[in-house]
Amino acid sequence: MTPFPRRRPWLPFACVFALTACASASTQRASTQALSTPAAGIAVAVPAIAHPGGETAAWWFRDGASQAAARGAMQGRAKNVIIFLGDGMSLTTVAAARIFEGQRKGGSGEENRLAWETYPATALSKTYNTDSQTPDSAGTMSAIATGVKTRAGVLSIAQSAARKDCAAALAAPALTLWELASNSGMATGVVTTARVTHATPGATFTHSPERNWENDSDLPAQAVREGCIDIARQLVETPFGRGFDVLMGGGRKNFMPVTQRDPEEDDKVGERLDGRDLIADWKQRHAGGVYVWNKAQLDAAPLDKPLLALFQPDHMQFEYERPKDTAGEPTLAEMTRAAIARLSRNGNGYVLLVEAGRIDHANHYGNAYRALSDTVAMSDAVRAANEATSVDDTLIIVTADHSHVLNFAGYPQRGNPILGKVRGGSGEDDDGGLVNDGLGLPYTTLTYANGPGYTGASSSQPAGPKRYPHMGKEYEAAHGRPDLRNVDTEDPDYMQESTVPLTNETHGGEDVGIWARGPGSDAIRGSVEQNAIFHFAAQATPRLRAALCAKGLCDANGVPVELPAVENFKPR
């Protein structure tokens, strides 16, 4: 009788009978382990300080460099960097949008993955501003753009300057990733569904103590006397080369004088009081540059010329309304493809921001349908970037600037419509029926902690469920909850109930996700400060870190650790 074979301690028991299959499995495990093995890190000493009093821009820069280097970002060999930013894309928004898209496809939804959820690298980003526990978009994007955490409401300046303090801001600009890329001979681009002068895109090529100084009519007289200029003008007049090679989004009104009528909406004019036509100025600065304001013009624009595309006087449409736009607006995916097609012509590589800016606005409006559909549109854009780039030379980072107070609650059964009323059970029991609250009334899976969905009467809508758009004012106290049994909560204009009545729903202060693929992406893991995202990108891109080292800003290991001075990177 053949003795029972001795089981090798490193093989699973089933492998005794399937050695070939297990050898294959072992090889796959080894391959997976090799792919997931963290890159060798480099230690960067960071002085201990008292928080928040001891924080400075130089300290934040070194601390961010330390986080990236310790995780192995210096081993990256990226030629190109794309940062996708879902403005206000909380983890709840991601989870709900995943199900929303999956149910649109006919599935139960939970098993679906958004485009970036297939990426191998993930991390959590701590989003607070230096002066605010719950952050805003200006301070958060400034951290991502400069490697330096700063105050709420300011664009790419150090925290030493108070908000609205022009003189202090002029003395404290922080070099951005896009300025550094332009200085290094790389192409640069910005794509957004918001105004291009809004907080997130504004942080790429401008420096301002006030995010709302989007055109000259927004600046107070003292700021003008002290030498501050508006964000739109800074975008056009940036001293860093020619500035952006591609800029697409909304916000025409901030580039046009009040004497100029909008080309699409005849009842609107520009908002500039200085008489400047910044679109004409941009054309003059960019010989052969192409300006477009609708999708047909974008489709016809040459690929070998700089591009300025302003598709709306204000923000671009929500994805839900976009197909109804009179002149025709491109999708975020179409803009992403158009940007990559142009930027990739530069042999030195490129740095591109793609912002789904209106996820944030829909959440502020208390309307989950628009927030989720715009998140799905961002997923389409990420998928387009995946298809248009190579994982071998392009680092793609997907993240959010901050969270929102969207809640995902109750015990809905698997496949329950994400915008629907909870069916399933209360607590751990599941009977599959419509679930009622303690008052005997049904409720929805998604709600907001605060905002205009409060069900008490307001000056513009009666008591009960609210319909988009509703900017609630002069609220009356709600007397119990409304009966939703005959209310279509999946209607695009239904506004989810909120607990606290506010004109606008607020941001949330919790962490947001980071997802990444490409060279250097395996360094993106764990829990990091938001300003480390700049350092992940800069350290993983040899051309960018070489530019910093050339100015004497690197340590003995070649890690950029010293805060760069903007003046040292401007063309002479």
Image (spheres, grey):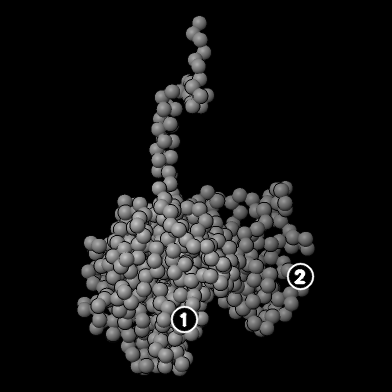
Numbered tag placed on residue 209 in the rendering? 1
Q: Amino acid at mark 2?
A: Gly
List x then y, in percent, for residue 72.
40, 52
Measured Cα–Cα span from mark 2 to mark 1: 44 Å
Residue at 72% of width from left, 53% of height from top? 426
Q: Is residue 374 left or right of residue 420?
A: left
Farthest residue in the right direction? 439
Q: Helix or strand or loop: what does disc 2 sit on?
A: loop
Residue at 47% of width from left, 67% of height from top? 59
Residue at 41% of width from left, 82% of height from top? 170
Q: Is residue 442 above or below residue 462?
A: above
List x then y, in percent, for residue 413.
64, 50
Residue at 36% of width from left, 87% of height from top? 256
Numbered tag placed on residue 107 in the rendering? none
Asked if the residue at tag 1 contacts the one at tag 2, i.e. Cβ–Cβ closer than 8 Å, the answer is: no
Farthest residue in the top direction? 1
Q: Is residue 287 above or below residue 354?
A: below
Is residue 547 visible in this depiction of the protein?
A: no
Lower sequence index among marks 2 and 1: 1
Few, some or many C-alpha atoms within 10 Å of disc 2 (few <14, some 14-19, many ≥20)? few
Q: Amino acid at mark 1?
A: Pro
What is the quadrant of residue 346 in the picture? bottom left
List x then y, in percent, for residue 425.
70, 51
Q: Which residue is mark 2?
A: 480
